[in-house]
Amino acid sequence: MVLSAAIALALMASPAAADPTATRDAIERLDELLTLRVESGLLREDAVMPAILVSTEPRYEASADWFSTRVIEVLDGAFGEGGLRVCQACSVPRVAAEEGVLVYQSGPMGLDEVVRLDDQTRGDAPPARSAIWVEEHGNGLAIRIIDLATGRVLLAQNIDPDLIEYSNSRRTYAMAEELERRARGDSLTQAFVDIAVVPGQHISLDWTDQWGPRNERLSGVTLSVLDPIVGVGASHYRATRLFNTTVGAKVLMSLPTAVVNAVDAGGAAGDVIDPLLTGVGVVRVPFGRSNYGGVVTLSTNGEFALGISLLNVTFLPVLP
């Protein structure tokens, strides 16, 4: 029993060892994310640099020799060389005189201490704008960038090789943003392209606003190029909870028929290619969370068709 306890204590006291592959891949993802944020303006270089690298803490023995150097390379590459200051004093116990009293401090350093050390050591250089912490953890690394003047968080992110946690954070943010939009009652524009060609034919493009207390209704305008051959009109749908199926209808006016009837004041021309008005019932079933789905249409012209519906596809020049 005593021997087992001694072995357990020895193992707990030994430095942690792990495969550094996950950390290397996470640093590559950090490099990509910082570059994207700088290029998009979400993280401006002039808001970060000059910066103080307060700490780079490797978790595993296998990462200790290269972790700090690789992080510095990534930060220099993202924000520009020459503006990064490494604070070696930030990771050791500190002694400072405050109002005639010597104060001994250890552990994490606060922003006021970072500013004080920068003031004491930077010389004639401009004051640092931000402080950066980078730490290795079990699945990758964590980074924090804080504005030293205001204490505002410029970036706080856990990064793993596959960006799973990053994706989950974005999904949670998107959900919160959607709930806030619903609470405000703001509408949401949706675009649909229905391509149904078996056995009948119906091709149309819809622009709709999603509204209602649960955003279950969609109303808008529609343009048809088949059934009727060229038509414009209005559409209305309701989204159900059964696989997010959308059920509704559209009423379309045939433009050729309307033009001929307008030219013929007596209206004797009647229907040219299609009836003046055509009603089309529509059922759309999305394929999971993709931008595609199946569509079924049935028109008052006797056309029954099955096909594909494109849901807010990005290559359409419709809406941002």
Image: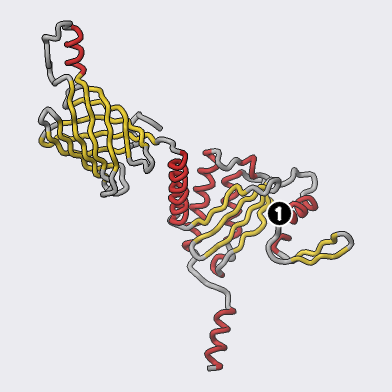
Query: Residue shown at 61%/51% (left/top)?
Result: 145
The answer to whether 319 appears left or right of 250 in the picture is right
**Which one is nearer the viewer's eye here, 92 or 80?**
92
Q: Quadrant of residue 214?
A: top left
Report the residue at 50% width, 60% height from top: 140
Q: How is the image coloured?
A: secondary structure
Residue at the outermost front position: 213
* Residue 186, percent from left and from top: 44, 36
Q: Residues within 10 Å of mark 1 (few under 14, many from 20)?
A: some
The foreground one among 167 and 186 is 186
Give residue 204's quadrant in the image: top left
The quadrant of the picture occupied by the C terminus is: top left
Circle 1: element type? helix
- Residue at numbered disc 1: 111
Which residue shows up at 49% across the image and 48% down it? 32
Residue 173: x and y in percent read 47, 48
The location of residue 55, given as percent across then percent down, is 65, 59
Residue drawn at (48%, 52%) of the image = 29
In the image, 86 versus 208, the foreground residue is 208
Residue 250 relative to residue 137: left or right: left
In the rendered image, residue 171, in percent from the top left (x then y), is placed at 43, 50
Going by the image, does 179 lie left or right of 243? right
Task: Please say if 84 is above or below 211.
Answer: below
In this rendering, the answer to whether 82 lies above or below 3 is: above
Dot 1 amino acid type? Leu
Total residue callouts: 1
Question: Looking at the image, which residue sits at the far right?
Answer: 100
